[in-house]
Amino acid sequence: MVRTLDRYVLRNFLANYVLSLFVLISLYVVLDLLFNLDEFTEGGKPVLLALRDIGDYYLYNIPLYFSQLSGVLCAFAACATLARLQKQNEMTAILASGTSAYRVAAPIILAGLAMNVLLVVDHEVILPQVAAKLARSRDDVEGARAYGVWCVRDGENRLLSARQFSPKQRRIRGLTIMELSTDHASLGRLGDIVTADQAEWDEERHGWNLIRGIRVPVEAAATAGLRGDHSIERVPIRFYRCELTPEELLFRQKAQWIRFLSLTQLTQLEKQGDANPTQIAQVRHGRFTLPINNMIMLLLGISFFMHRLPGSVLTQGAKALGTCAASFMIVFVGQQLLGSAGIQQYPALPAWLPIFLFGPFAVVLLDGVKT
């Protein structure tokens, strides 16, 4: 049953959450901009164009910043709510009425669970939708720069390479597509090779219109070479259908691109063999443990503000800050390691280690609350 006290505590928590959301993400953006402003203004870019690129870049990165700061937001809002009750002596009056401190914290914990539902929606719905935007570099927000593409897997049996790839123009120069054999007897061997001087993306047909495109059957060429025949069969080709769009092709160039995919997309990648299974396992473990780590951080913070005896709010806040900061740093470092090739032997360790370290500590602190 929702009581007046629950609504009061919940209202204060949500107000503090919205305030901390605005302040922390704004601070994140400002600090990142201060350190990387020169990348937005490279090449003597006009001021208005640089401002447009800055707004465009950080607008799409806000969901990523939210996922990284979600635990801090909940912990800060919860601690601020209870600290306010302590400072104004409202906690003393509540406890004197016979209400347990655990009962006071109950709506905050439930609200923290609800905020973690938003985190799941962010990971599974929002981030996959803007994943291609997250792959952009600060000095090339418009995608005007040409990139080299080397052996990017497209579907189950194709490797795509390009000497120059222009995301903005959706154009490729020096295209090479190596088709791998799908026959069980020769699985994984090189099949045909498709080359083209240029290729332009056709959205309606979902493929590349090839200029001077040629298909070379490797097996036939090898047979002709064994016979001493140097005339290799070349089949002209004008269109080649691909599964990867230009945006997805650019996205695959980012080092930790699998971190931005949903669990469904990760499962598809695992079935197709488009990514390292160990890296996929790391990201999947991190996706499940991050909400748990966020709740542990919240419980660590509020345990310092739930005592029946009034104390210094600054002292309690300093203890909560130090404990939550240690938890956040370990979780953050673990999340940055997810999807990296350096953690192979124990793929679940970076995700679960903070739970093993701080979960029992949170239980001990909450059990020691005198209420």
Image (cartoon, rainbow, N blue to C red):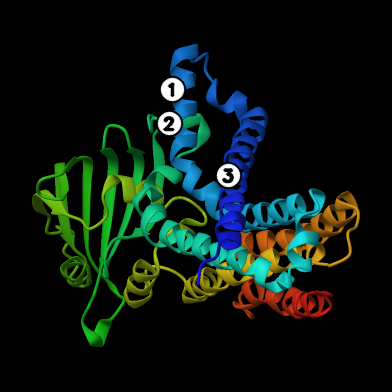
Q: Tell me what residue is drawn at x 27 percent, y 32 percent.
A: 169
The spot of residue 55 in percent (x, y) is: 46, 28
In this view, the residue farthest toward the front is 97
Q: Tell me what residue is drawn at x 83 percent, y 57 percent.
A: 322
Judging depth in this view, the residue of 52 and 132 nearest the camera is 52
Q: How far is disc 3 from disc 2 in space, using C-alphas? A: 20 Å
Judging depth in this view, the residue of 227 and 360 nearest the camera is 360
Q: Which mark is residue 52?
A: 1
Judging by the rendered image, the residue that carries numbered circle 2 is: 56
Is 193 situated above or below 167?
Answer: below
Judging by the rendered image, the residue that carries numbered circle 3 is: 21
The spot of residue 309 in percent (x, y) is: 89, 64
Q: Amino acid at mark 1?
A: Arg
Q: Residues within 10 Å of mark 3 (few under 14, many from 20)?
A: many
Q: Amino acid at mark 2?
A: Asp
Say whether residue 203 is visible.
Answer: yes
